[in-house]
Amino acid sequence: MTERFSFALNATDGKARTGLISTPRGDIRTPAFMPVGTAATVKAMLPESVRATGADILLGNTYHLMLRPTAERIDRLGGLHKFMNWERPILTDSGGFQVMSLADLRKLTEDGVSFKSHIDGSKHMLSPERSMEIQKLLGSDIVMCFDECPALPADRDRIAESMRLSMRWAARSRDAFGDRPGHALFGIQQGGLEQDFREESAQALTEIGFDGYAVGGLAVGEGQEAMFGCLDYAPDMLPVDKPRYLMGVGKPDDIVGAVKRGIDMMDCVLPSRSGRTGQAFTRHGVVNIKNARHADDPRPLDENCGCPACSNYGRAYLHHTFRSQEIIASMLMTWHNLRYYQDLMEEMRTAIAAGAFEAFEAKFHADRAEGDIPPL
């Protein structure tokens, strides 16, 4: 097992890439989807169950963990991996996105962001240096630099101001992170939907030097067409030999479109959140298990899926348990969705390696256009 963080690009097909991120805690196959464990748990799942879906890495949340149970407590208890019983790699976000969403509860300055906790109103300060300290206490394998992310749409002056502040914070994050063999620090490209600002941000980050690079500031209200328009050029501005991470994305067709445009890593709460609200992702689109048409349907959610929900239970049972508000419904639906996402990533890795991504993409869209087939 490696003692350092590294990335090897194994194959490309157009802009789509497949490779391997190596860390002391294990390898991460790319393209990779990272399930979100916001508060040191992927909701409704045991860690070993998440691993069984095919996940190589989880995402933890700096903002939520710093407030409860606190990074200092997690550190005293042996770090986040031990605390949540996940021994493989963990990426933690910097807290910048969550702080952005606090609106009236925050105050932004050059130093950082002061804010009131959404839990109890207590006052806190997040800066590049404090974000690096928290993520070090958590024991994160991949640390994200602290940034500021404006919601879209926003005018050019606001986007430019925010992006340049984030670049200054990126340099401070790099300095505060220091030299930590085996751990990686990712820079975050900002610039909204403005191509010249994206270029300026990418150049600034490359000059600072990071172990990987994220495309930030998307999936914040701009819509898929605008997001893809940005992804047509933004990843190309980043170093070819480093992982490229699209933050907070997304739906299956978002993920396929992002990989097509050169993205290596993604995360989103959607598969777990949708599972808890009765939505299942399948090859033929979204199945709403709440619908009455499933009440007498013995078929699995997806006949091609090997998860426990599809192997051992029918739609009628899932419909019944969800309508009865039984906890097992959230467990089974979440397990299925996470397995679907990991199967999707594996199919894309295989297609890219074979030079067949275009054929994969055509079948992906054709299957979804066919829709969920009702029982005979």
Image (tube, rainbow, N blue to C red):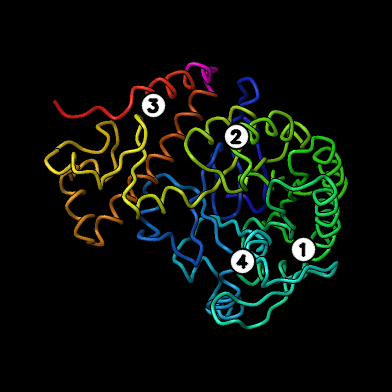
Q: Which residue is mark 1?
A: 177
Amino acid type, label 2: Gly
State the separation of the CA atoms marked 1 and 4.
Answer: 15 Å
State the separation of the CA atoms marked 4 and 3.
Answer: 36 Å
- Work out whether 82 lies above or below 308: below
Task: Give x and y (percent) for residue 187.
Answer: 75, 50
Q: Which residue is mark 3?
A: 368
- Work out whether 50 lies above or below 230: below
Q: Earlier in the sequence, mark 4 or mark 2?
A: 2
Q: Earlier in the sequence, mark 4 or mark 3?
A: 4
Q: Earlier in the sequence, mark 1 or mark 4?
A: 4
| Foreground disc of the pair 4, 2 | 4
Q: Earlier in the sequence, mark 3 or mark 1?
A: 1
| Foreground disc of the pair 1, 4 | 4
- In the image, the segment drawn in magenta is 353-359
Task: Give x and y (percent) for residue 98.
Answer: 62, 62
Disc 1 element: helix
Q: Which residue is mark 2?
A: 19
